[in-house]
Image (cartoon, rainbow, N blue to C red):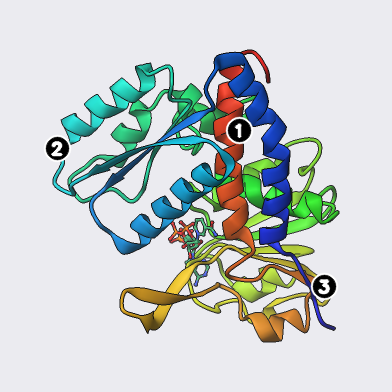
């Protein structure tokens, strides 16, 4: 079997086209497009590259990006003051603080400082609670992007057994909650695995849809996959160097052998990554729409 490729780039491109009328409606009502404040502390190359991508996406579709690049030794109080200013700024619809934060800064405290109604990353405890309760809020971009990718490839989650490998706050747990919620893109039976799971392969082999979010290069091998399963590879592991400072990206799934067993599979890069970025744009537009009563 040779698996169908679930192309996230193509779906993201289609979503960008769908954003155009929404952006026009916001700009028409307010006289200005939605605005996203992106705060980056320090110079971690991976964080810098994520932030650059987000800012480029904003520029491409016409969202205003407000850049706040701060030194790694910025005191926590100064960061909290900046967040308070952005929360109060009517031109800012979304506030994103790129994680991880430098040592010495209390991440939980920083996330708590962001106005939940501008929390376009969906990491604020209020939005985590809204997700659990299936109430309107901001859904985290990677899990929401995965659900969109499945929906737009007509892969049914209702009644499917989805095995998620990884229980982080940004991918595994929120994805499990989204899939458990009732309705479109949900209604799945969900198993969540982690590093203490006994006999991981016995679990993954039961999956109709297998999601790997482990941060372990090529950890999911062909014998761990049920023939015909859908495989979603969230992993973005930087291995080797293709040029100074530039590493090669590798997923959590051993792509070639697994694509001989699976019915559908996401590539890395070009699968979940572009969907994550598209959902950030969606959340930023949604925030502006809500503020203007358009949503
Ligand atoms: P974390 O390191 O926060 O979590 C990894 C999870 O995988 C943990 O729950 C851990 O278990 C589990 N795990 C690790 N090793 C094993 C193992 N051998 N067997 C079973 N479970 C294991 O990572 P993230 O969730 O933040 O990210 C996961 C991956 O996804 C990374 O490669 C990251 O770069 C990528 N990523 C990609 C995004 C995208 O847009 N494509 C966005 C976000 C992340 P335990 O809890 O027990 O430690």
Question: Is residue 203 visible to the viewer in this orientation of the structure?
Answer: yes
Are there few (<14), some (14-19), or many (20+) residues within 10 Å of tag 3? Answer: many
Residue picked out by circle 2: 75
Rendered location of residue 97, percent (x, y): 36, 40
Quarter of the image that includes the C terminus? top right
- Closest to the camera, between mark 3 and mark 1, is 3
Which of the labelled discs sits on residue 263, or is there none? Answer: 3
* Residue occupying the point 70% across, 81% down: 258
Q: Nearer the viewer, residue 168 or 27?
A: 27
Disc 1 is placed on an element classified as helix
Rendered location of residue 51, percent (x, y): 40, 51
Q: Which of marks 1 and 2 is nearer the N terminus?
A: 2
Disc 2 is placed on an element classified as loop
Separation (CA) of disc 3 from disc 1: 30 Å
Separation (CA) of disc 1 from disc 2: 32 Å
Q: Based on the displayed image, in which of its 4 quarters is residue 89 positioned?
A: top left
Residue picked out by circle 1: 131
Q: Please state if 124 lies on the left or on the right of 228 as rendered.
A: left
Are there few (<14), some (14-19), or many (20+) residues within 10 Å of tag 1? Answer: many
* Residue occupying the point 33% across, 37% down: 108
- Closest to the camera, between mark 3 and mark 2, is 2
* Residue occupying the point 18% across, 31% down: 78
Q: Which of marks 3 and 2 is nearer the N terminus?
A: 2
Q: Which of marks 3 and 1 is nearer the N terminus?
A: 1
* Marks 3 and 1 in Cβ contact (< 8 Å): no
- Closest to the camera, between mark 1 and mark 2, is 2
Quarter of the image that includes the N terminus? bottom right
């Amino acid at each position: 079997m040779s698996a169908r490729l679930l192309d996230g780039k193509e779906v993201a491109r289609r979503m960008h086209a769908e954003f155009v009328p929404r952006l026009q409606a916001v700009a028409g009502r307010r006289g200005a497009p939605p605005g996203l404040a992106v705060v980056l502390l320090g110079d971690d190359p991976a964080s810098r590259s994520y932030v650059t991508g987000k800012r480029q996406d904003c520029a491409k579709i016409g969202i205003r990006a407000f850049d706040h690049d701060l030194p790694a030794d910025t005191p926590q109080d100064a960061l909290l003051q900046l967040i308070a200013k952005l929360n109060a700024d009517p031109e800012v619809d979304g506030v994103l603080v790129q994680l991880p934060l430098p040592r010495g800064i209390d991440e939980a405290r920083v996330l708590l400082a962001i106005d939940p109604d501008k929390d376009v990353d969906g990491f604020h405890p209020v939005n985590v609670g809204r997700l659990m309760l299936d109430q309107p809020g901001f859904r985290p971009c990677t899990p929401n992007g995965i659900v969109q990718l499945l929906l737009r490839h007509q892969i049914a989650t209702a009644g499917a057994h989805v095995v998620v490998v990884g229980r982080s706050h940004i991918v595994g747990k929120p994805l499990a909650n989204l899939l458990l919620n009732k309705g479109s893109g949900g209604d799945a039976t969900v198993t969540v695995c982690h590093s203490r799971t006994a006999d991981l392969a016995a679990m993954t082999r039961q999956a109709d849809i297998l999601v790997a979010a482990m941060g372990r290069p090529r950890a999911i091998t062909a014998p761990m996959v049920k023939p015909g399963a859908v495989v979603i590879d969230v992993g973005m592991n930087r291995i080797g160097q293709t040029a100074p400072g530039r590493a090669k990206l590798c997923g959590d799934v051993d792509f070639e052998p697994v694509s001989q067993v699976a019915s559908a599979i996401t590539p890395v890069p070009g699968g979940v990554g572009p969907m994550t970025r598209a959902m950030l744009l969606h959340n930023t537009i949604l925030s502006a729409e809500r503020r203007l009563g358009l949503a």
